[in-house]
Image (cartoon, grey):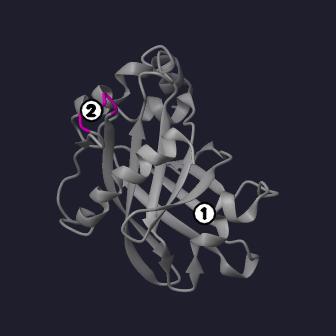
Amino acid sequence: MSRFFRQAVAVGAAWLALSAGAGAETSWRIAAPYQGNPLKVAVLTGEGTVSGHVFPASLEFSCHPDAKVPRVVLRVPSMVADWDFHAYDSAVRGTALGRRFLTVLASNRRVIDRPAFTGIDGDNASFMFSWQPNEALLARLSRQNDGVMIMLAGLRRSQGSLETRFVFPSDPAPMREALAPCSNAVSGQKKAASDAQ
């Protein structure tokens, strides 16, 4: 398991709080997985739906100072209804998935990205989909009253799709703090935000 995923699993302690306050105004929460380690993770709580079931979800942005590459994790319960996310586990499969199952959409349902992801088990019965966010997604994080929807296609076409939704908070400062080590990587936010209009 890579260093990034060990760190991401450590953030899983935050999973216990995801079901609280679903109707409250959203806000970024900063998690520091390791004492004495500069890694910070900006966590945003959202909601997912699949097969008529509603469940808590989180979107977690981080940038390790050594790597200087931003990462995002979509965290969901490890099993919801008839969906067993272990089927997406990269280590279990041993091979990359043949098609892009994850789609990131703007609030107006415009496609932002179809990233290749790595799937891995997290703490507290959660499952994580991790990828490197593109500039179009990073640029939207500072927009008030904006958000994203992330759709995951079922491995079987008869499963349909799982949807998670996140509303970006009015105060982007905690998110910017977590991504500060990646300032060069996200410097194109202003241009990407203009392009994404």
Residues packed near mark 1 inside 10 Å, few (<14), some (14 to 19) or many (20 plus): some
Tag 2–tag 1 contact (CB < 8 Å): no
Tell me the amino acid under the disc marked 2.
Pro
Instruction: Tell me what residue is drawn at x 66 percent, y 47 percent.
Output: 114
* 10 Å crowding of disc 2: few (<14), some (14-19), many (20+): some
Q: Residue at x 41, y 22 (%)?
A: 65
Expressed as whole percent of the image width and height from the top left, the position of residue 135 reads: 54, 28
Badge 2 is on which residue? 172
Residue assigned mark 1: 152
Label 1 residue SS: strand
For residue 37: magenta? yes
| Front residue (pair 135, 78) | 78
Vertical comparison of 152 with 114: above or below: below
Q: Amino acid at mark 1?
A: Leu
Front in this rendered view, residue 116 or 23: 116
User: In the picture shown, does residue 135 fall above or below 5?
Assistant: above
Check residue 135 in the rendering and tell me which mark sits there, or answer none: none
Q: What is the span of residues highlighted in magenta in the rendered image?
A: 35-39
Element under label 2? loop
Using the rendered image of the protein, determine whether residue 9 is visible from the camera's viewpoint. Answer: yes
